[in-house]
Image: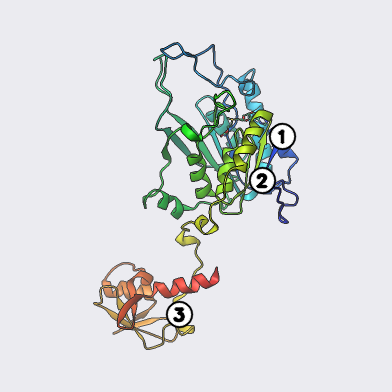
Amino acid sequence: MKTKTRSSAASLPLNQILAGDSIDVMNSLPEGSIDLIFADPPYNLQLRGDLHRPDNSKVDAVDDAWDQFDSFKVYDDFTREWLKAARRLLKPNGAIWAIGSYHNVYRMGAELQNLGFWILNDVVWRKSNPMPNFRGKRFTNAHETLIWASKNEAAKYTFNYEALKSLNEGIQMRSDWVLPICNGGERLKNEDGDKAHPTQKPESLLHRILVGTTNPGDVVLDPFFGTGTTGAVAKMLGREFIGIEREEKYRVVAEKRIAAVRKFDKDALHVSTSKRAEPRVPFGQLVERGMLRPGEELYSMNGRKKAKVRADGTLVSNDVKGSIHQVGAHLEGAPSCNGWTYWTFKRDGKNVPIDVLRQQIRAEMQ
Ligand SMILES: C[S@@+](CC[C@H](N)C(=O)[O-])C[C@H]1O[C@@H](n2cnc3c(N)ncnc32)[C@H](O)[C@@H]1O
């Protein structure tokens, strides 16, 4: 696979799948070099005996050696060690997503907090097509839990609020996500036509995570890479990835999968950004730059109120003077007013929102 390194994070093995134990490999990578970690570690399912469907066919459960731990203590020690290694790798404003089931997610949550990570949310991934509970002795296990945590409480983690809202048709994204499990054409098969991996995650899950909590060019590390779902989605979305996987058979599958993935068009990778993250443009700058002239009249969006622009970037209307926000609020008898969306100016007989001029300045700043 093509290797790319960056000067800011010297000799990072970008867009590679590294063979070996995730703790050892993570400890060999440079400190503070990773923007986001997505981790889907062994669940420690502790399965007792085979599981069969009502037609007596055997369920392809996770009974692999990589999921076996002798005791909770051994599992906790392992969890602590990989989380410690992961935290060392994160940049100061980095974050981690760790996914698990009831078997392991509480144990991971406790270790995350003990190590100084700051939990931002837990997200319930509700499976729209879960496997039934064949024995009928418990509830259908229809969800997994993801913990999203920043490196520490003060970290300025990435959260593309507006992009997530857009993904959700303009409604704030909630912490319960309904997405199907990975099957159909997306499910990778081996030469015998069986599942190539027992726990391949759906690309939709990674799409939401990467669009919501990383930016193009960010480095995403997955220490339990499996079939490389994280790498495949990272490549599509123009993020860099590093995968770690101990089992050769999974590395082979992941290499082939990622090689076949096409990166989306660069322009399509831009997402709606948080209004709060946009650079501040004072109204006075519009006047200084001659986009609006002192003495020019502004009109409220409904055309009922007007005010004059002054040379210092304030407005005057009858006896009231002040900022675009203060004068708008006074004229409306309202406690506050967003002057940028309230005022318009006239050009060629049409009322144009002053916010158009602010956007023009912001576009120049990009
Ligand atoms: C739950 S699966 C991850 C599946 C992956 N998210 C996907 O979509 O295909 C966990 C993976 O971690 C690997 N693994 C387990 N322990 C490991 C370790 N100590 N070091 C490296 N890889 C490990 C296993 O081989 C397995 O492929």
The residue positioned farthest toward the left in the image shown: 304
Which circle's residue, 3 or 2, is located before the other in the chain?
A: 2
* In the image, the residue with mark 1 has its CB under 8 Å from the nearest atom of ligand 1: no
Where is 17 relative to 44, above or below?
Answer: below
Residue linked to disc 3 = 286
Quarter of the image with the N terminus is top right
Look at 47% across and 73% down and name the residue there: 360
Q: Position of residue 275 (x, y in %)?
A: 45, 61
Return the disc, 1 or 3, that comes first in the chain's sequence.
Answer: 1
Residue 177 position in % (x across, y down): 42, 39
Numbered label attached to residue 15: 2
Q: Work out whether 230 lies above or below 354.
A: above
- Confirm or reject: label 3 Cβ below 8 Å from ligand 1: no
Q: Amino acid at mark 3?
A: Leu
CB of residue at label 2: within 8 Å of ligand 1? no
Q: Tag 2: Cα neighbours inside 10 Å, few (<14), some, or many (≥20)? A: many
Between the residue at mark 1 and the residue at mark 3, the CA separation in whole angstroms equals 56 Å
Type of amino acid at the residue the image marks with label 1:
Ala
**Quadrant hosting residue 18:** top right
Residue at 66% x, 22% y is 74
Q: Which residue is mark 1?
A: 19
For mark 3, give the secondary structure. Answer: helix
Instruction: Point out residue 335 in the picture as x, y percentages from the top left corner.
Output: 31, 67
Q: Secondary structure at mark 2?
A: loop
What is the spatial separation of the Cα atoms under label 3 and label 2, in whole angstroms?
45 Å
Give the image location of residue 109, x and y in percent: 55, 33
**Viewer-proximal residue, 244 or 335?**
244
Q: Quadrant of residue 6?
A: bottom right
